[in-house]
Image (tube, rainbow, N blue to C red):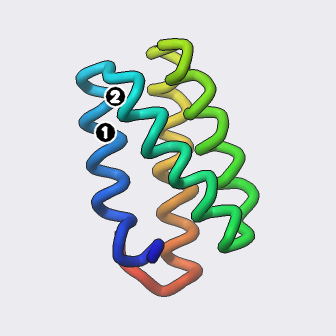
Amino acid sequence: MFDRDSPANVDALERALEREHDRELTFVAHRLVGTCGTLGDLETQSLALELEREASSSQWNNCREIMDKLILAMSRLTERLGIPI
């Protein structure tokens, strides 16, 4: 699931952040919280949870900073799993 959805999730996160669409950003971040938890990647899960919280309160500057960290963490995760992002 993570391998198939990773590129779409990153695109959805970036689009939602660009449009400052709090519901969409919160939804996708929440989905990542669950997926990363299932995979046992606490770093990525923690960042996704932080993004979810910040998006729900429309803290856009914080969201952008977290998003950068989250994309790097997802990249490391996909590398460990041997899947492209």
Quarter of the figure that contains the N terminus: bottom left
- The image quadrant of residue 41 is bottom right
Q: Relative to 11, is 5 above or below?
A: below
Rendering coords of residue 18 (x, y %): 26, 26
When the figure is inspected, residue 31 is found, relative to residue 3, above or below; the finding is above
Going by the image, does 35 lie left or right of 23? Answer: right
Badge 2: few (under 14), some or many (20 or more) residues near its Cα, within 10 Å?
many
- State if disc 1 and disc 2 touch (CB < 8 Å): yes
- Residue at numbered disc 2: 17
For the residue marked with disc 1, what is the amino acid?
Glu
Residue 39: percent from the left, percent from the top?
66, 73
Q: Quadrant of residue 57?
A: top right
Looking at the rendered structure, the secondary structure element under dot 1 is helix
The location of residue 7, given as percent across then percent down, is: 31, 63
Q: Quadrant of residue 52?
A: top right
Which is more toward the observer, 80 or 25?
A: 25
Of residue 32 and residue 61, the one placed in the foreground of this image is 32
Name the residue rendered at 36%, 34% in the picture: 24
User: Mark 1 sits on what residue?
Assistant: 14
